[in-house]
Image: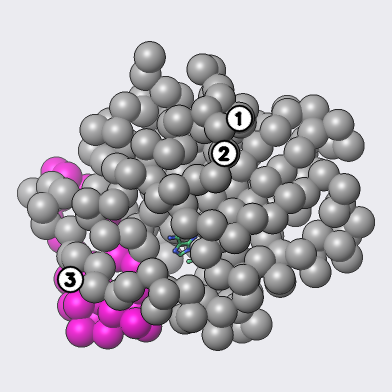
Amino acid sequence: MTDESDVSPVTRSKSEAKSAYDRLSRWYDLLASRGEEKAKKTGLRELAVEVGKTVLEVGCGTGSSMETLAESVGEDGEVVGIDLSIGMLSITQKRIKKVKLSDRVELVCSDAANLPFKEDSFKAVFMSFTLELFDTPEIPLVLFECKRVLNKDGRLSVVAMSKNKTEKDTFTMRLYEWMHRRLPKYVDCRPIPLQEILKNAGFIVTSQEQFSTWRLPIIVALTKKTH
Ligand SMILES: C[S@@+](CC[C@H](N)C(=O)[O-])C[C@H]1O[C@@H](n2cnc3c(N)ncnc32)[C@H](O)[C@@H]1O
């Protein structure tokens, strides 16, 4: 059985995370697996962003999903991407400029645990492979911030490496967690019990799909806020 207390702690500091992603930014897209890309596409499809809306991506990285979101909102909508790493944001900026969508995209260098936006600012929030980078006590803070900036009927789509509360950890999962503990600067994320975490943070999971990467489960969860 897995609960939040079984999740490995994150020992890397934020400034170490920022520097690591700044260094990785130029190579990041070469490392993405097919499983990850498929899961992200599903998360974006489930979020079903409408034309004219304002949406946020938390931890937008090199901007592959920002491009899709910017196409979905159309010329009257707006997409805001936040990330801790200037290096990652500058790759996103180049990507968005190349496809001529800069007029509807804003990029902000910020910590997801302290979003620089007013409440009720966004119709939808997307977050992929980012929540599992935060230390366990900070995950509810990040989700609280997502909830705060979302509209009353807003939706949050989360794609994350996940472990199931009712299943025993597989050998691959134990190996991955072992590497996370031994090499926290390189293996920076780890599986989290996503459904339980979302529920505890006040989100209702309205649909869910499972994928895998390197034989590790990925959950794509579409949620709405509880009132
Ligand atoms: C594994 S990458 C995922 C990027 C992108 N979402 C994707 O799926 O390709 C995690 C991203 O989260 C960003 N990040 C890490 N810590 C963060 C924090 N405290 N606040 C905001 N972004 C953060 C990193 O800079 C990186 O771009």
- Is residue 72 shown in magenta? no
Q: Tell me where residue 120 sits by quadrant.
A: top right
Q: Is residue 56 visible?
A: yes
Residue 174's tag is 3
Kindly give the residue lying farthest to the top in the view shown: 227
Which numbered mark, 3 or 1, is in the foreground of this view? 1
Query: For the point 64% across and 55% down, which residue is it?
Result: 108
Which numbered mark, 2 or 1, is in the foreground of this view? 2
**CA neighbours of label 1 inside 10 A, class few (<14), some (14 to 19), many (20+):** some
Q: For the residue marked with disc 3, what is the amino acid?
A: Arg
Question: Does the closest atom of ligand 1 sit within 8 Å of the Cβ of label 3?
Answer: no
Query: For the point 46% across and 44% down, which residue is it?
Result: 158
Q: Which residue is mark 2?
A: 117
Question: Does the closest atom of ligand 1 sit within 8 Å of the Cβ of label 2?
Answer: no
Return the residue nearer the eye: 64 or 37: 64
Vertical comparison of 47 with 182: above or below: above
Element type at mark 1: loop
**CA neighbours of label 2 inside 10 A, class few (<14), some (14 to 19), many (20+):** few
- Which residues lie in the magenta part? 163-192
Q: Which residue is mark 1?
A: 121
Q: CA separation, marks 2 and 3?
A: 38 Å
Vertical comparison of 10 with 151: above or below: below
Q: Earlier in the sequence, mark 2 or mark 3?
A: 2
Element type at mark 2: loop
Q: For the residue marked with disc 1, what is the amino acid?
A: Ser
Q: For the residue marked with disc 2, what is the amino acid?
A: Phe
Q: CA separation, marks 2 and 1?
A: 7 Å
Dominant secondary structure of the residues highlighted in magenta in the image? loop
Percent coordinates x, y for residue 61 in the rendering: 59, 64
Q: Earlier in the sequence, mark 3 or mark 1?
A: 1
